[in-house]
Amino acid sequence: MQVIVRDNNVDQALRVLKKKLQREGVFREMKRRKAYEKPSERKTREKAEAIRRARKAARKQAQREGLLPMPKKRELAPRRAPPRSF
């Protein structure tokens, strides 16, 4: 995974990296691997994840077919211009 540091702004690059790691599920995986997981707990977790995925897919399909309303699109706030330096 790569993040470009622009204008020596390491804080912003760190924020971007954390967001990418969050999206990829790295933090969730690290937390899961921190301690031993019994096989029965693993089966329970995987089953719950599968149910969650199936429900999400069914919800998306119902939205595409018009049975459920589509989610409202969030309006992005206009970006502020960076302060000018003279």
Image: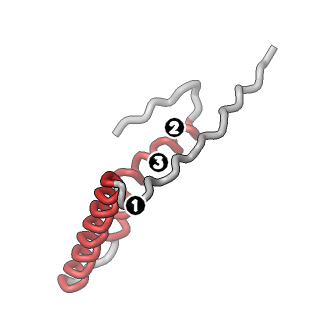
Which element carries disc 3, helix, strand or loop? helix
Q: Nearer the viewer, residue 38 or 34?
A: 38
Q: How is the image coloured?
A: secondary structure
Q: Residue at x 25, y 66 (%)?
A: 54
Please give the residue where the numbered disc 2 appears in the rendered image: 13
Q: Nearer the viewer, residue 1 or 73?
A: 73
Residue neighbourhood size for the residue with mark 3, other residues' Cα within 10 Å, grouped as few (<14), some (14–19), many (≥20): few
State which quarter of the image contains the C terminus: top right
Image spot of residue 16 (x, y percent): 49, 41
Q: Residue at x 31, y 54 (%)?
A: 65
Horizontal side of 66 relative to 71 (left or right) equals left
Specify which label sits upstream in the sequence, 3 or 2: 2
Q: CA distance from mark 3 to mark 2?
A: 10 Å
Which element carries disc 1, helix, strand or loop? loop
Residue 19 is tagged as: 3
| Amino acid type, label 1 | Leu
| Amino acid type, label 3 | Lys
Specify which label sits upstream in the sequence, 1 or 2: 2
Image spot of residue 19 (x, y percent): 46, 48
Q: Nearer the viewer, mark 3 or mark 1?
A: 1
Q: Which of the 4 quarters of the picture holds residue 56?
A: bottom left
Q: CA distance from mark 3 to mark 1?
A: 30 Å
Specify which label sits upstream in the sequence, 3 or 1: 3
Please give the residue where the numbered disc 1 appears in the rendered image: 68
Which element carries disc 2, helix, strand or loop? helix
The reply to whether residue 29 is visible in this rendering is no
Horizontal side of 58 relative to 31 (left or right) equals left
Q: Nearer the viewer, mark 1 or mark 2?
A: 1
Q: Which of the 4 quarters of the picture holds residue 12?
A: top right
The reply to whether residue 18 is visible in this rendering is yes
| Amino acid type, label 2 | Ala
